Image (cartoon, rainbow, N blue to C red):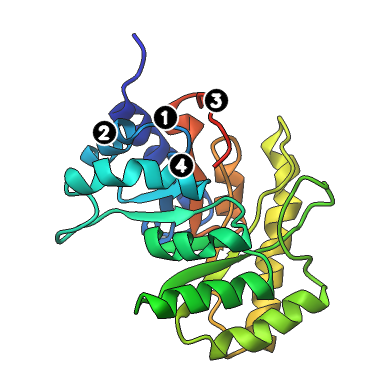
Amino acid sequence: MPMSLADNIARVQEQIANACRCASRAPESVQLMAVSKTHPAEAILEAAASGLRLFGENRVQEFAGKRDALAAAGLLAGSDPARFHCIGPVQSNKANRAAEIFDAVDTLDSLRLAQRLDQAAAARGRTLAVNIEIKTSPEPAKHGILPDSPELAALLEQLPDMQHLHVCGLMTVPPFAANPEEARPYFRRLRELRDSLAARCPRVRLEELSMGMSHDFSVAIEEGATVVRVGTAIFGSRPPVGRG
């Protein structure tokens, strides 16, 4: 019989716990983000009924279309609301809407975007959590700031003065490989960069490492991930969706 969503979640949580034991880490040191992009609000509500409260969405427009149903179900308010992170690229012209509907943007990849998000959050009287997306792979399709770029240095210098952004850490997406071990160097590179930047830039807190997906999150945990982004292993294969 096919496994239910609750079964999938339980299996992923067990795999996270096993990976933490292998790495001599406490299971609670790793958060599970359910990547709900392209899946309907009903699937998110089902996952939330199994206890998940952290979700990742790729597109501003797509999540905006689900938000009313989630709010009507009480998932966005109360004593234990769900949090939704934008984990896809944010165009500057969508920064205002992203700052309005998301709890965090994990794909901060330029000083210009940081300035737009800070202004948008200020206009709404809120503080927006952000992660800096680092391009650890040479693949042209991958997004993020290069680790040794002047852009990253400028961003880290100015972020502490942006009163409406709360910097949490770093995020990366390695090249896909059938063998999860091939992703290890990219995860290790992000951890080493975080450690280096934390020492060089004490005004910026970089505690979070968002890395690892359905097929390689165990390796990511061994390399220090604090958030793993799991979609297919929870929700199954993604249906196609238009651009948003």
Camera-side residue: 165 or 12? Answer: 165
Q: Which residue is mark 4?
A: 62
Inspect the image, locate mark 2, and give the three-letter code of the amino acid beneath it: Glu
- Separation of residues labelled 2 and 4 (CA atoms): 18 Å
- Residue 240 is marked as 3
Q: Can residue 172 be seen in this snapshot?
A: yes
Density class for disc 3 (Cα within 10 Å; few <14, some 14-19, many ≥20) is few
Q: Give percent across and percent down for residue 143.
A: 72, 54
Q: Which three-letter amino acid code belongs to the residue tagged 4?
A: Glu
Is 116 located above or below residue 71 in the figure?
A: below
| Quadrant housing the N terminus | top left
Closer to us: mark 1 or mark 4?
4
Q: CA distance from mark 1 to mark 2?
A: 10 Å
At a point 28% along the width and 31% down the height, the residue shown is 42
Using the image, determine if residue 141 lies above or below residue 76: above
For marks 1 and 4, give the CA distance.
Answer: 17 Å
Element at badge 4? Answer: helix
- Please tell me whether mark 3 sits on a helix, a strand or a loop: loop
Secondary structure of the residue carrying numbered label 2: helix
Disc 1 target residue? 235
Q: Does 194 appear above or below 95?
A: below
Residue type indicated by callout 1: Phe
Quarter of the figure with the C terminus? top right
- Mark 3 and mark 2 lie on one chain; the one further toward the N terminus is 2
Q: Earlier in the sequence, mark 3 or mark 1?
A: 1
Comparing 146 with 16, the one in front is: 146
Residue shown at the point (67%, 65%) measured from the top left: 109
